[in-house]
Amino acid sequence: MYEENGVIILVVEDDEDVRALVNATLEDLNYRVISATDGPSALEVLNSDQHIDLLFTDVVMPGGMSGLQLAERARDRRPELPILLTSGYNEEFIGARPSFGANLPLIRKPFRRRQLAETISNILKPE
């Protein structure tokens, strides 16, 4: 259903260095990347006509909107949109994920290139 070079991933990450590394990694994996620095910026993209195949968002972000809140709003707008969460914090720090977020895949930072590639592939091409 998906071909890597046609897949567009919306990356939401507030840390500039992490965002640049993730974007470069995804582009190296032949994904197309759109970046946002926070939840409100990501919502602008999601509210547009821009095609997005995957929302990849940090859980803990400044600006009053967490990645979980963004994911919930994204699902309201685009129910079919696959979502991948990421965090460098443990569950106790970020709090137990609410029932909405409990079913969303989470990849822990720091992650390796191969781990990211496999996780995205599994989300986009479920067996």
Image: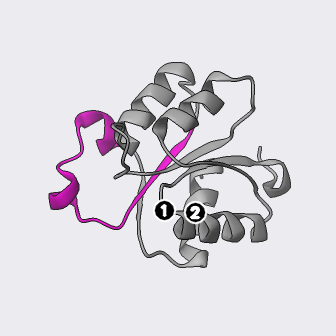
The residue depicted at 60 percent of the width and 76 percent of the height is: 113
- Where residue 49 sits: x, y (%)? 74, 23
Is residue 85 left or right of 23 when viewed as pictured?
Answer: left
Q: What residue does disc 1 label?
A: 15
Q: Amino acid at mark 1?
A: Asp
Can residue 27 be seen in the rendering of this structure?
yes
Q: Is residue 91 magenta?
A: yes
Asked which secondary structure carries label 1, the reply is loop
**Can you tell which mark lies on residue 19?**
2
User: Quadrant of the image for the N terminus?
Assistant: top right
Q: Amino acid at mark 2?
A: Arg
Asked which secondary structure carries label 2, the reply is helix
The residue depicted at 57 percent of the width and 51 percent of the height is: 123
Q: CA distance from mark 2 to mark 1?
A: 6 Å
**Can you tell which mark lies on residue 114?**
none
Q: Which residues are magenta?
A: 82-103
Tags 2 and 1 touching, CB below 8 Å: yes
Tell me the quarter of the picture where residue 54 sits. Answer: top right
Q: Is residue 90 magenta?
A: yes
- Where residue 4 sits: x, y (%)? 79, 56
